[in-house]
Image: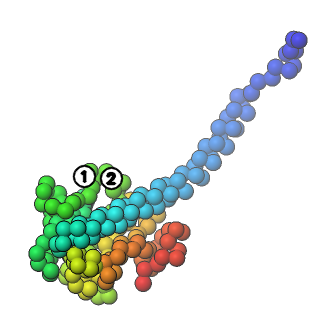
Amino acid sequence: MKLSKQNMRGVTLIELMVTLAILAIILMMAIPSFNEFRQRSALRGASDQFISFWANSRMEALKNNSLVKVSMSTSGNNFCLGAATTTIPADNIKCDCFTANDCDVGSFPADQAEWKRIRYIGDYVQTPTAGSQIVVIIDPKRGGLSNTAMAGYWQIASPTGGVDYKLNINIDRSGRAVVCEPASSTSKMPQFSGRRCN
């Protein structure tokens, strides 16, 4: 059966241009949502790394029956978590996780790209009032803090550009790490609507 020329109709240039214009508009509307999704994902991933690092440091303290100090070191815009053994229950000297073998328990990350451009906001903050302790020490006997007054948090924020999300990694008096969203955060993450920090 032969098709007549009337049945062999193609797409005109105008129809193609209209279709491409509609696709471009839909894409432009989707880009901000996609960027916000990427920022939230990067922030959640970084908070998971914090929790995992803290849990491993607690396990090392219990396993080796020794005090372990955990701290955050910064160098320009770079930052890393470090954990080292100590014999001083009130030790306030960070191990330098940028220096090889300075943090004998462990350090994270091996490469700054693993943070996915997450920002670190300031030093460790003690709660309920700001103190001067910048190192958190894990007691091996209880798996908690060597001094309950060391309870506090680290704060991280999403990459710059777009919406500014923030999360706190709270270390409570018993040494548990919990991620929550600070009440002062201007942009809210829907996943943390039930986990707001006090």
User: Residue 198: percent from the left, percent from the top?
Assistant: 42, 84
Image quadrant assignment for residue 173: bottom left
Which residue type carries mark 1? Answer: Ala
Q: Nearer the viewer, residue 42 or 89?
A: 89
Q: Nearer the viewer, residue 50 or 30?
A: 50
Q: Residue, x 50% and y 71% (percent of image)? A: 192
Q: Is 170 above or below relative to 114?
A: below
Q: Is 133 above or below relative to 166?
A: below
Q: Residue, x 32% and y 82% (percent of image)? A: 174
Q: Residue, x 59% and y 52% (percent of image)? A: 29
For label 2, the SS is helix
Q: Are marks 2 and 1 in contact (CB under 8 Å)?
A: yes
Apparent side of residue 77 relative to residue 156 in the rendered image (left or right):
left
Q: Dot 2 corresponds to which residue?
A: 114
Q: Is 182 above or below relative to 35?
A: below
How many neighbours does mark 2 have within 10 angstroms: few (below 14), some (14-19), or many (20 or more)? some
Apparent side of residue 73 relative to residue 39 in the rendered image (left or right):
left
User: Residue 145: percent from the left, percent from the top?
Assistant: 25, 80
Q: Dot 1 corresponds to which residue?
A: 110
Task: Give the image's coloring scheme.
Answer: rainbow
In space, the residues marked 2 and 1 are separated at their CA atoms by 8 Å
| Residue 179 image label | none
Which residue type carries mark 2? Answer: Glu
User: Residue 96: percent from the left, percent from the top?
Assistant: 15, 62
How many neighbours does mark 1 have within 10 angstroms: few (below 14), some (14-19), or many (20 or more)? few
Residue 94 seen in this snapshot: no
Image quadrant assignment for residue 85: bottom left
User: Residue 50: percent from the left, percent from the top?
Assistant: 33, 65
